[in-house]
Image (spheres, coloured by chain):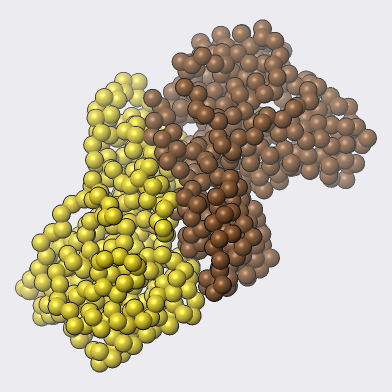
Chain colours: A brown, B yellow
Amino acid sequence: MTPAPSPLAVPFPPMPPIAGAVPRIARAGYKDWGRCDLTYVELAPGTAVAGVFTRNVCCSSEVELGREQARLGQARALVVNAGNSNAFTGYRGREAVEAIMAQVAQHLGCPPSEVFVSSTGVIGVPLPQDKARAGLEAVFAAQPCAWEDAAATIGTTDTFAKGAVASAVVGGTAVSVIGIVKGSGMIAPDMATMLGYIFTDAAVEPAFLQAILSAASDTTFNCITVDSDTSTSDTVLAFATGAAGNAPLAGFDDAGADAFAAALHDVCRQLAHLVVRDGEGAQKFITVTVTGAQSDESARRIGMAVANSPLVKTAVAGGDANWGRVVMAVGKAGEPADRDRLSIGFGGTWAARDGQPLPDYDETPVAAHLQGREVDIEVDLGIGDGRATVWTCDLTSGYIAINADYRS
Amino acid sequence: MTPAPSPLAVPFPPMPPIAGAVPRIARAGYKDWGRCDLTYVELAPGTAVAGVFTRNVCCSSEVELGREQARLGQARALVVNAGNSNAFTGYRGREAVEAIMAQVAQHLGCPPSEVFVSSTGVIGVPLPQDKARAGLEAVFAAQPCAWEDAAATIGTTDTFAKGAVASAVVGGTAVSVIGIVKGSGMIAPDMATMLGYIFTDAAVEPAFLQAILSAASDTTFNCITVDSDTSTSDTVLAFATGAAGNAPLAGFDDAGADAFAAALHDVCRQLAHLVVRDGEGAQKFITVTVTGAQSDESARRIGMAVANSPLVKTAVAGGDANWGRVVMAVGKAGEPADRDRLSIGFGGTWAARDGQPLPDYDETPVAAHLQGREVDIEVDLGIGDGRATVWTCDLTSGYIAINADYRS
């Protein structure tokens, strides 16, 4: 019953252990499936946490609570339920989350506010408290698992486990940054990934961790889209256990802060790309690069309009260098643009410049480029210095097949 | 090669002649197809005109010029080219339109500004002037045709000819209002239909015609979506020949103005629905009714977020009453909403009320409703009096098949 891996799948990378962060998995049975669906990561006392969350106003209790908890900056545990998002379940949904927080807090002897809970799956069915309770008892007793197992367990319609690794030297101390993420539908701007978790053994002050996570998300998770739909549960959390023993990073003036921020950004970018690579029905990985816009933010909006256009995405699916649809998408973005200065290219070959098709445009190299798994679309507005890169996948009948029959 | 008619197709209605508006068709050969592709409607001297146009900033020369021409309020002819949109073709595209205007103006002995031109089809290829010139000569010599033939000739990927009729009594005079329209991809808010034309024998002052056309468009053409993509060529023009001989309508104080505005609105609504019924790959006609929003405009935006959501549209395609996806779409609209007051229903049956699934929710009638060709989705925000209705179709693998291989 497991779908074949996406043709854009990449292998799970070798991952170092992260001292102070121990993953375990168990089977709570949230759905009638023979797989683990509860992930538990125990975190060392003093672990700093930061988070970015969906802007969907109908967000889940997990997101509501998680947003408040992240402001406090301290974490002792992460619990991820797969198969039931617990969203739009009213007070019963909130009670289910609070029960999980209380049970874990009692187990660890910590405040409930330090227990972070995420849930993913069908909306509108309250998370069954009995299953969660028994699942937690099982996971407390389980052996630690590999990060790859945790990455597989947080997935729902994902076709492969997704992880990313980076490292940095902070004040003479080597630190690791790893991340796991799940997709893969309902992926849109304003927190693109459904659930992503980053762990590092670096010591980082919560406020600084939040600042660099937010900045990294803006150019990674918030620059991908699969289908323009924004989940009610989207969450990215970063946990810094401090076990590496470096002097805690509190700002960019600290030695190694730039390297650490770069490593965290790198992991965010890798994870964001992995979500696109497992976009439902995806056959091609599309990079849209926008230059010459009035501002970076304007470039990002134009890039997202292109990346979200069903007509652009189906053209790429069909291997059709239909640059007219890119023009259309640029024009509908509602951002400053001058039709007669606009240029469109594919894979480094301009198809149109300054508002007109090139007279000697040879579609042969473009057609060859569009046959590949990685398609680049270049848009130059010709009116400023703003630039952005966004990522998406093509829109295929596979997306329809997956989503026309998800619940059954 | 002609695709099968949409399962949502309806027969072309019987249409009265409109005195002062005579349609003709010919074959210009804009594409290599064995069908007429040039439509010409000659209008009596003194015909008033009003128009609404795409807000896509990369609009075609036809739209740029048409917008200026419509402000002058007078029309003698309409020319519609099918198979080539002439958009994004720079000065050569503009020259092609001006050449058509000049040729028709010379034929009729009128100012070029009274000749309205639309083009639809592939973007980025300048309209060949020689084909247009010969096509116009042929059409000038052609016999008048039925409106159904004109409706078929303006189509591109349309699977059936679309027309609408209404009538009114204006100051004791019976007047007719008819319309033809083409779709059917690249349909989105901000001028939803690609090309729509309305003809009436009523006498109406141009400014008043513009006012009622704009108002009617706001709740009809601007409340439909097929794929959220906004064409560079979207145009609706209304022509009032005045041949019925009523005292010209100049405002709502005039006798019969309300009835005429209602008839024009009725034609716009019918045409808008027809575009959705021929949405690419459409199998179901979806009506989204939003009530209890903070304002009517907020309700419209929420309705469009639901109607544009690929996950909602694929759920309907699969006959899946997945109201959780409706919640998600409401939440991503960015409009005021309170998750715990939100109610979602299908076909008159509430699935969720006040932010929670109904305890006694019986999915049987909803599942039966979703098996039909017409699916109603009800959203009640519970926070105000704003309301709106929008229309869309489901998203099927047929849409992918059509759009992944359009140019070839």
Please indicate whether residue A406 sits to the left or right of residue A39 in the image. left
Image point (34%, 31%), residue name = B321
Relative to B182, does residue A197 appear above or below in the rendering? Answer: above
- Residue toward you, B43 or B265: B43
Specify whether residue B174 is in view. yes
Please indicate whether residue A81 sits to the left or right of residue B266 in the image. right
- Residue toward you, A400 or A261: A400
Relative to B15, does residue A180 appear above or below in the rendering? Answer: above
- Residue toward you, B238 or B405: B405
Image point (28%, 91%), residue name = B106
Q: Quadrant of the C terminus of chain A?
A: top left
Relative to A54, does residue B251 appear above or below in the rendering? Answer: below
Image point (90%, 32%), residue name = A173
Q: Residue lying farthest left?
A: B172
Spot occupied by residue B67 in the image (x, y as percentages of width and height): 38, 76
- Residue toward you, B158 or B137: B137
Spot occupied by residue B197 in the image (x, y as percentages of width and height): 25, 69
Q: Residue lying farthest right?
A: A172
Spot occupied by residue B209 in the image (x, y as percentages of width and height): 25, 73
